[in-house]
Image (cartoon, helix red, strand yellow):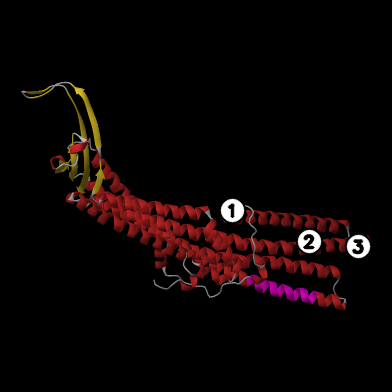
Amino acid sequence: MKKITFLILLLIIFVMPCFAKQTANDDEMNKNTIIYLNLDWWENYKDEFLINHLKKLYEANYDLKNAQLRVKENEKLVKMQLAEELPSLSFDGFVSRDFRSSMQKFGDMAIPNYSQTNIQLPLTMSYEIDIWGKNRLKTKRNKEQLKISEQQQRAAYISVSSDFAAEYFNLIKTDKLISIQNQIISIQQDIISKVKEKNNAGLGNINEVLQEEKLLTVLEEERNQLEEQREILLNNLSALLSSPKEDIIRKSYDDIVVLYNLPSRINSEIINNRPDYIIREANIKQAGYDTKIAKKELLPSFVIFGQLGFNAYSAASMFNRNSQLANAGIMPSFDIFSGGRKIAFLQYKKYKYEEALNNYHKTVLDDIKEVNLGLFNLKTAEKNYQKSKERLVNQHKINSLIIDKNIIGTASNLDTLYSEEAELTVQKDEVTNKINYLISSISLYKAVGGKNLYKLNEDI
């Protein structure tokens, strides 16, 4: 009985650290999730509606939920593989009854037909001696897969939140463009009315009326397209929030904050922060472990086994001293011939390792290209926004001059309408370039791996 108690205590010693480690893993995952939210970056846009939507997005989006589940799945795979490094202890009870068996012979000794009960209550323990470190390598390999799933989760957070924010600002832009378009259409209707009056007075011709009416239909078509685009954006945002009927409360275009003083240069080492870069590094390590494991498979394995318990032929004598069962041994195993399967498997893993190296180098080049392109797009978008603001200021001055001329009688009401329409058209360009600049900042945030652009060159 003392031996059985010792084995049970040994099992508890092995199992309890696993539970403690699992609790630590859960805490670490929750901590990582908070980091992935990166709300300190999104707060730079000074938009409480965007922040509230993002918080709901992190809780409701199914892609993010699945990414979190994949992390948990790989945590269990690591735990399962870690169990392979530990001894296993099991209870394999056995009860049988022989009914009037035929005579058996053991050499010259004959046993006539008989009946008996066999009862076995053993604790069985086995342990594969990890001489070559094969099981340890398998655990390390699974840990790299866990790391990959964590980075995939992080990539999902960056991608989904960036896509949502870009669609959100596009929706605000569309709202503003529809408002401006309605003003332009209203002015165009006034222009048509004035042109008709001019034609009726014999100061114009019918072609002018037809041209202005034709322009009105074009403007109305543009409004229809903008309204369709707004519905598409609303549906996309609702889908990301996993709520088909979600009311997307949003800020007014005029209250949008533009981010200035963003970095004009970026250290190329910033790609080390990107999830795909970290994943490629983990893939190389994983492929390296797989190659080493394939080599270890060519070597023999050794399993220690033992049993401790009771073996009796009746329930009454089950726990007698003479019924105690104990055995132990070691079992070596080595494949003498497997048809070249293990050699082929080793070569296969070597090829996978080379492929992982090539993918890593390609990812480095692609990441640098994407960061540089994102930075260039941001600079270009900022320049275009500044130029459109200058153009709008100039057009406003022109419009003010036309209004002054109209007051003193040197310009007609029709000239004033044309001037107002021209200013609204330029304003549409300014709106588009302003939102494009905001979206370019989001694209750069995504390109650098979800790092706050104002803290971009820290810790590099």
- In the visual, does 216 lie left or right of 459? right
Q: How many marks?
A: 3
3 or 2: mark nearer the eye: 2
User: Do tag 3 and tag 2 residues touch (Cβ < 8 Å)?
Assistant: no
Within-10-Å neighbours for mark 1: few <14, some 14–19, many 20+? some
Q: Between disc 3 and disc 1, whose residue precedes? A: 3
Where disc 1 sits, the SS reads helix
- In the visual, does 379 lie left or right of 231? left
Residue displayed at 20% across by 33% down: 118
Which residue occupies the foreground of this view, 268 or 215?
268
List the residue tagged with mark 2: 185
- Quadrant of the snapshot with the C terminus: bottom left
3 or 1: mark nearer the eye: 1
Residue 82, image x and y in percent?
29, 52
For the residues labelled 2 and 1, the Cα–Cα distance comes to 32 Å
Q: What residue type is labelled 2?
A: Ile
- In the visual, does 340 lie left or right of 178? left
Within-10-Å neighbours for mark 2: few <14, some 14–19, many 20+? some
Q: In this view, does 288 lie above or below 105?
A: below
* The label number, if any, that marks residue 197 in the structure image: 3
Residue 153, image x and y in percent?
44, 57
Within-10-Å neighbours for mark 3: few <14, some 14–19, many 20+? some
Residue farthest to the right, as pictured = 201
List the residue tagged with mark 1: 239
Residue 402, image x and y in percent?
80, 74
Where disc 3 sits, the SS reads helix
For the residues labelled 3 and 1, the Cα–Cα distance comes to 51 Å
The magenta-colored residue range is: 387-402
Q: Which amino acid does label 1 sit on?
A: Ala
Image quadrant assignment for residue 425: bottom right
Where disc 2 sits, the SS reads helix
Q: Between disc 2 and disc 1, whose residue precedes? A: 2
